[in-house]
Image (tube, rainbow, N blue to C red):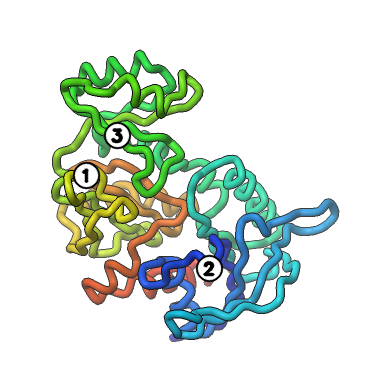
Amino acid sequence: MRAQPRRLLCVADALAGFKIAKDSTFAMLRECQRRGHELAVCTAADLHWQSGGPVQAWAQTLELTGHPSDWYRVGARSALALRDFDAVLMRADPPFDSEYFYATHLLQQAEREGARVFNRPQALREHPEKLALLEFAQYAPPTLVTRSAAAIRAFHAEQRDIILKPLDGMGGMGIFRVGPDGLNLGVIIETLNRHGQCTVMVQRFLPEIAQGDKRVLLIGGEAVPFCLARIPQGGEVRGNLAAGGKGVAQPLSERDWALARAIGPQLAARGLLLVGLDVIGDCVTEINVTSPTCFQEITDQTGFDVAARFVDALEQALG
């Protein structure tokens, strides 16, 4: 039975920057419109809260046209209370910086006023995408998070082949590999660590990256049965699509299913409707909660409608 039409607000990056052939937020919005839900859109910068009133957004109604070039129409900007929508989808991309942090506080206040926000703002704030991994360290490769250059050097001496990355990176930005010879370790530490000013994540290098960095999507705590293996190209160690990786959809392995069953229900219970696990070999390397992607690539290659699964879960959560 079709769910009743709902008013949905999507907090996302500017529509003009969307690449609709692969954008997962676009796929969500298209499926919502197909089901008759009313759409509005704003950016995180449009959120505001004035004393004595509710949290609002300078929002615009949204209609998707179905044309690849002129693909959307929006109405006039108006100040709308978030509590007056049936659901608010938080889909702003990383980095998880101070402004993102403040946005979660505004969204949490909107929740207190009656708004339903997905993913829940408190859960977003408490699960920064790289640090969240260490709660599930038994499923991760050896990992260190530190500001200490000496600790990074000791970790390298122990593990011999490592990956270093900034905590606030996305799309493969700022990722370095240092092999057993330690070549350029000093300058890489200086670049990422900034003489002790910035925290760095360091992990043992996993050679299974050659078979791909798999994105396993969890929706409502359950795994989508296909993942997207993002395979490094041209001598790269990064599989990220933004870094030139090739995306190949494939069924989940038994290990992927086991990881999803171990982690998914715990995160769903905390208000994380949509999660993206990054899996290399047998290990989870990151837990993505801000704006997990790969919907369209999986659907295009397998026929499994990820956006429909997501909207099913959203409608079920709304009751």
Image x and y of residue 140, in percent: 27, 37
Q: Residue furthest right?
A: 52
State whether residue 32 is above or below residue 291: below
Kind of residue at disc 3:
Phe
Of 109 and 170, the residue lying toward us: 170
Q: Is residue 273 visible?
A: yes
State whether residue 300 is above or below residue 263: below
Kind of residue at disc 2:
Ala
What is the C-alpha distance between the residues marked 1 and 2? 30 Å
Q: Residues within 10 Å of mark 3 (few under 14, many from 20)?
A: some
The residue located at (38%, 75%) in the rendering is 308
Kind of residue at disc 1:
Glu
Q: Residues within 10 Å of mark 1 (few under 14, many from 20)?
A: some
Of 262 and 37, the residue lying toward us: 37
Image x and y of residue 250, in percent: 18, 63
Q: Quadrant of the N terminus?
A: bottom left
Q: Where does label 3 land, which residue?
A: 176
The residue located at (27%, 74%) in the rendering is 300
Image x and y of residue 19, in percent: 42, 68
- Tell me which numbered mark, 1 or 2, is placed earlier along the sequence: 2
Of 5 and 174, the residue lying toward us: 174
Q: Where does label 1 land, which residue?
A: 236
Of 246 and 57, the residue lying toward us: 246
Q: Residues within 10 Å of mark 2 (few under 14, many from 20)?
A: few
Image x and y of residue 100, in percent: 58, 47
- Tell me which numbered mark, 1 or 3, is placed earlier along the sequence: 3
Q: Where does label 2 land, which residue?
A: 16
What is the C-alpha distance between the residues marked 3 and 2? 31 Å
Contact between labelled residues 3 and 1, with CB atoms less than 8 Å apart = no
Give left or right: position of 91 versus 217: right
